[in-house]
Image (cartoon, grey):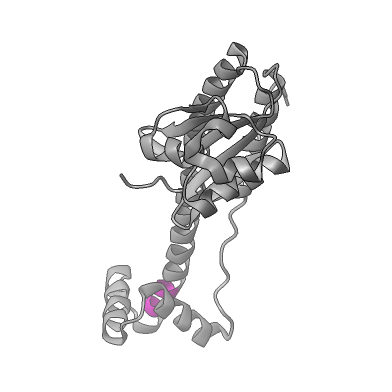
Amino acid sequence: MKRPSVPTDIEEFERALAECLTVAAQAMPDSPMLSIVLRGDDGLRTVACTHARAELLDELQEAAGRGPVLDALNTRRPVTVTDLAADSRWRRLAAESPEVRRVHCEPLESEGALLGVLTLYSCRTDALAAETLVAARVTAGHVGVLFRTALGVARMREVAAQLREALTTRAIIDQALGIVMAQRRCTAQQAFEILRHVSQDKNVKLHQIAASIIQTVSGEPPQRPRFEEPPQSTAGHRS
């Protein structure tokens, strides 16, 4: 399955993930260490955690190529380790972190695509509280929603940037058309055909040909129109 694209404003997205973990930790009575690992083309990366130790445990598993985090990624199912020290599958992880006794991993998905894993590391020997597991499932679901929202915002910004560029190049072409019409005493359609043929003959984009015409006539590069960002609306504000 194709991996989902990461939102372009990754810092904002990761900041939101860190806030999610902070809220989730407050709802967990047994205070486990939390981390969120995202899967990318260059491997796994811990993008948010409540303790530096949790990030180190994530890195140990990736380096070893095995661990409950990788199991959750491979199976796309929650993984619970009731006693890390007694589990023969992950002796190295247990040896590196003898204080960690319980681990719980929740896969993170968005519209069927696997994003990564939310992991709870606990130093307690008793079972994780029911409230903790519920909070983990709710947080995992919220991360999926957050990802879709962030991706939608990123796509809208990309479309807006493309529109601004299209409007800019169109404005430059229109200026060049006016120059050609004046010089050749021709219609706008005829001027456009002249520019198009030059573009094809020189294998140069039409807006670049237009820009060179403007610079030749005016002695300066064409002025790009400025598009102001719309003001941010404020809830409850009335003008």
Rendered view: 134 above or below 181: above
Residue depicted at 49% across the width and 80% down the height: 214
Q: What range is drawn magenta here?
A: 176-181
Rendered view: 233 above or below 211: above
Q: Position of residue 109 (x, y in %)?
A: 43, 33
Q: Is residue 153 visible from the viewing direction of this image? A: no
Q: Is residue 102 visible from the viewing direction of this image? A: yes
Rendered view: 223 above or below 101: below
Quick check: 195 left or right of 84?
left
Q: Position of residue 223 (x, y in %)?
A: 58, 71
Quick check: 199 left or right of 125?
left
Answer with the quarter of the image where residue 238 lies.
top right
Residue depicted at 56% across the width and 83% down the height: 218
Considering depth in this image, is 100 or 4 the residue closer to the camera?
Answer: 100
Considering depth in this image, is 232 or 99 the residue closer to the camera?
Answer: 99
Q: Is 193 colored magenta in this rendering?
A: no
**Which quadrant is the C terminus positioned in?**
top right
Q: Position of residue 131 (x, y in %)?
A: 61, 13
Q: Residue furthest top?
A: 130
Residue depicted at 52% across the width and 21% down the height: 137
Q: Position of residue 111 (x, y in %)?
A: 37, 32
